[in-house]
Amino acid sequence: MTAVVEVRDAHVVHRARTGGLFRRDRVYALTGADLSVAPGETVGVVGESGCGKSTLAKVLVGIERPVTGTVSFGGRELWAMPAAERRATVGAGTGMIFQDPSTALNRRLTVRRILRDPLDVHRRGTRAEREDRVRELMSLVGLPRALADALPGQLSGGQRQRVAIARALALDPALVVADEPTSALDVSVRAQILNLLLDLRERLGLALVFVSHDIQTVRRMSDRVITMYLGRIVEETPAGRVTDAARHPYTRALFSATPGLLDPVEPIPLSGPVPSATRPPSGCPFRTRCWKADAVCAASMPDFSAASRPGHRFRCHHPVQEDTPTRDLARQEP
Ligand SMILES: Nc1ncnc2c1ncn2[C@@H]1O[C@H](COP(=O)(O)OP(=O)(O)OP(=O)(O)O)[C@@H](O)[C@H]1O
């Protein structure tokens, strides 16, 4: 089956925001990322702040161009397309939902205009058909029609995120990327927005990439979970058994520190802070904090190994033994 989107060996390097005009360090935001998303599947992306989750999300929807590597949509290389074709492919094929709907929506436009805008830009149907589509989108995300002429500032946070979701769906994309879609919302409306995304995914057969700090939510939403560390994808695990089936020590440590697990464990303590993305360590980037690291880990970053379960791969010289419960690691290893 052709992937909706496929990223191969993507590298993204930024100029550091600090350091003065003439001395700007490079930030290695994404290093050799490979990811393929199949039609209708949900891929969760987890990792600590600054590990490159948003950068990967932007690469997937063509907002960020990797310095090297490829991004293919339906088997066609995005950055080899002429600009107009690329815009049309990305605009119609993907939708992005950002963290904070207050800043993601143009506050001078009414809900109706916000939702009609992508239809106008991509010249979808007659004017009357576009108005019909706006009404349809509002009902799809549970917004009352009476809000069509409201401005974003007149809506609640949850309603604004519904508008952002409706806008992302306007052109019927095959892929929606949601980057921390609930973290700026009141706790009381988070569940409603997550349930809406789950419902839309089922009804529309969307492929969904879901980026979040909230590991429990990622587990609940996803078919597969991608763990990132310092710009690299270090593990890809089927979501169902991620807490005890993960083989990468970092995934285990991350999950062990998650509050509210059904089967709570002692968090695995990690030594030291996350290294800077301007000077990542040699070899495996996690080695400076890993209790299993040795000289081999400093010398090279291993390629992905396939675990015995389908859809499970990891990059580690000293993986956690298969089926070792995390509670045993927390007691023994560090
Ligand atoms: N435009 C930019 N200019 C300079 N550095 C950037 C830029 N965008 C991101 N970075 C840096 O790239 C790295 C990856 O950032 P990214 O936003 O992708 O991480 P993240 O995992 O999404 O973080 P968070 O969970 O805090 O949103 C970080 O070190 C960040 O500071």
Image (cartoon, grey):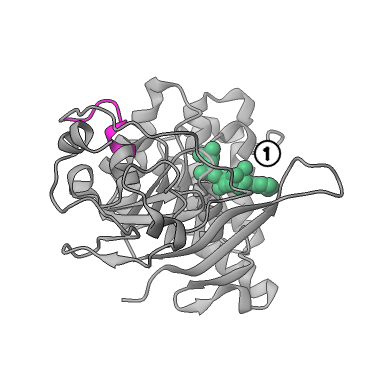
Residue 25 placement (x, y as % from top left): 73, 50
Q: Main secondary structure of the magenta part?
A: loop
Specify whether residue 126 is in view: no
- 78, above or below 308, in the image: below
Quadrant housing the N terminus: bottom left
Label 1 element class: loop
**Which quarter of the figure has residue 194?**
top left
Q: How many marks?
A: 1
* Residue drawn where x is 35% and y is 30% of the image: 192
Residue type, numbered disc 1: Asn
As rendered, which of 67 and 62 lies closer to the eye? 67
The x and y percentages for residue 185 are: 47, 26
Relative to 106, 262 lies left or right: left
Residue 60 on image: x %, y %: 51, 60
Q: Quadrant of ligand 1?
A: top right
Q: Which quadrant holds the C terminus?
A: top left
The structure residue drawn at horizontal position 36% and vertical position 57%, both measured from the top left corner, is 206
Q: Is residue 91 above or below residue 229?
A: below
> Looking at the image, which residue is at 19% across and 65% down?
310
> In this image, 154 relative to 247: left or right?
right
Residue 250 visible somewhere in the drawing: yes
Q: Which residue is at the front of the view, 188 or 92?
A: 188
Q: Magenta stretch? A: 254-262
Judge from the rendering whether residue 52 lies leftward or rightward of residue 208; answer left or right: right
Q: Is residue 245 magenta?
A: no
**Residue at image mark 1:** 106
261 magenta-colored: yes
**Residue sitting nearer the eye, 7 or 298:** 298
